[in-house]
Image (tube, rainbow, N blue to C red):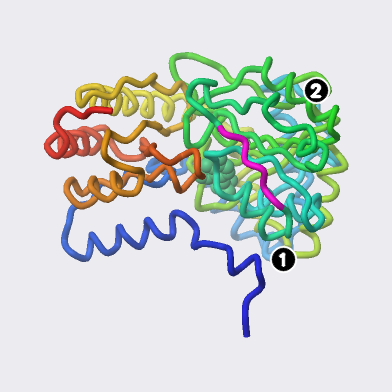
């Protein structure tokens, strides 16, 4: 019996392949430094774990949760938006709880795309945007993100017949994998574009709190009129070192939030309530670990930038996210360069082509190992590469 057409075209998830390569190298006894996966290496703050510990003993939390999440959690999200971005959200209608933002990002395509409908997807980009469209029977139109445009899509380059057929547009700032940031001025232009073509903008913002050099980043929902055309995906994963807990949300346009909630009520049964209480604690409790994390990532970024510059890379240091995006040296493509670095230096980097066609010729480094391991990784790379040329 054959799996369906979409499944036949679905590759194993990018990091599943990388995990397999890492396991193989480790089996050979190689000391691997993994700069591949964007998973915080720091623990979840203790006060959040403590809240979980209490909540887990409460029998009321052992039953099916609401699929759209506890109102108390959604209210904590609305409060957070208000405090952080001065945005008012109605927790009942403008926030839905997700099993991690990845889940909602994949499922929103099922709620908006009919067969053959177009989704505008950044390239390079987080793979789930395009995978959602593929699984829902839609099509992705790739919006190239190029260095010369600050890794922002050029809206004027989207052909108007494509824009007319498009139902969704995904954006993600601060950006994975490029580390680029976008200002409110860009979001304002996107709102106008979305209004003109009747498109739902899905802004994915899990890195909004991971910023360096003292900068503070905007929410898409701060653009005037954004709630008419957009939702924003967000997550506790990166802000509070909670990737394993699986809790996030979408907020914004009430029709889209209602559709996503109704879809979810039919396919999943929500986030374990004890985790939602831990999530409330994360959003409402002490926020100092965010600053501490940013300081640590910024130091690691500086170590990595110094390492790259010593070898000849001339790139701008990212001001947000824990990713560095850099071109491969002359004579390599993304895959051959990542392979060389794994085999000769025992360092895992992510080949840029895993994020789309326009990621070819690039690689991504995640700042998710200690400063010392980062130094060790770059010392090993220097031994292998010396000075590089482009
Ligand atoms: C751009 C982007 N969006 C969404 C996610 C998913 O985050 P989560 O499902 O843990 O909320 C990630 C995770 O790496 C990401 O990089």
Question: In the rendered view, does 359 fall on the left or right side of 128?
Answer: left
Position of residue 200 measured from the top left corner of the image (x, y, whole percent): 79, 38
Above or below — where is 195 with respect to 27? above
The stretch drawn in magenta includes residue 292: no
| Discs 2, 1 touching: Cβ within 8 Å | no
Q: Residue at x 75, y 51 (%)?
A: 69
The residue tagged with tag 2: helix, strand or loop? Answer: helix
Dominant secondary structure (helix, strand or loop) of the stretch shown in magenta: strand
Q: Residue at x 60, y 41 (%)?
A: 235
State the extent of the magenta-drawn residues as a range.
139-144
Above or below — where is 352 with respect to 134? above
> Which residue is labeled 1 in the image?
63
Image quarter of the N terminus: bottom right
Position of residue 161 measured from the top left corner of the image (x, y, whole percent): 80, 37
Quarter holding ligand 1: top right
Which corner quadrant of the image does residue 361 belong to?
top left
The residue tagged with tag 1: helix, strand or loop? Answer: loop
Above or below — where is 135 with respect to 188? below
The stretch drawn in magenta includes residue 143: yes
Position of residue 164 measured from the top left corner of the image (x, y, whole percent): 82, 37
Q: Which mark is residue 192?
A: 2
Which corner quadrant of the image does residue 155 belong to?
top right
């Amino acid at each position: 019996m054959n799996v369906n057409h979409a499944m036949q075209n679905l590759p194993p998830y990018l990091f599943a392949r990388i995990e397999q390569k890492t396991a193989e190298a480790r089996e050979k006894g190689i000391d691997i430094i993994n700069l591949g996966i964007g998973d915080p290496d720091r623990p979840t703050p203790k006060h959040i774990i403590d809240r979980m510990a209490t909540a887990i003993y409460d029998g009321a939390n052992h039953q099916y949760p609401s699929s759209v999440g506890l109102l108390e959690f959604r209210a904590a999200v609305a409060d957070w938006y208000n405090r952080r971005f001065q945005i008012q959200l109605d927790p009942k209608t403008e926030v839905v709880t997700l099993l991690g933002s990845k889940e909602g990002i994949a499922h929103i395509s099922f709620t908006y795309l009919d067969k053959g409908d177009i989704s505008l997807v950044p390239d390079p980009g987080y793979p789930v945007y395009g995978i959602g469209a593929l699984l829902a029977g839609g099509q992705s139109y790739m919006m190239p993100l190029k260095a010369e445009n600050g890794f922002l899509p050029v809206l004027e380059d989207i052909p108007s017949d494509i824009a007319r057929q498009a139902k969704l547009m995904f954006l993600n700032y601060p950006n994975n994998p490029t580390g680029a940031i976008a200002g409110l001025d860009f979001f304002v232009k996107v709102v106008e574009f979305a209004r003109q073509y009747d498109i739902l903008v899905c802004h994915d913002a899990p890195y909004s709190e991971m910023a360096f050099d003292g900068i503070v980043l905007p929410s898409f929902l701060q653009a005037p009129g954004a709630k008419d055309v957009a939702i924003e995906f967000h997550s506790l994963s990166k802000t509070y070192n909670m990737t394993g807990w699986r809790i996030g949300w979408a907020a914004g346009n009430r029709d889209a939030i209602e559709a996503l909630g109704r879809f979810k009520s039919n396919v999943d049964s929500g986030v374990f309530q004890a985790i939602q209480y831990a999530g409330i604690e994360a959003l409402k409790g002490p926020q100092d670990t965010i600053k501490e994390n940013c300081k640590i990532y910024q130091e690691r970024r500086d170590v990595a930038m110094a390492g790259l510059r010593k070898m000849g890379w001339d790139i701008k240091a990212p001001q947000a996210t824990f990713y560095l995006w850099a071109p491969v040296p002359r004579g390599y493509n993304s895959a051959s360069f990542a392979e060389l670095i794994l085999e000769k230096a025992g360092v895992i980097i992510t080949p840029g082509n895993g994020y789309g066609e326009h990621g070819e010729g690039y690689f991504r480094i995640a700042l998710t190992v200690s400063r010392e391991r980062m130094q060790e990784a770059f010392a090993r790379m220097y031994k292998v590469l010396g000075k590089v040329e482009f």
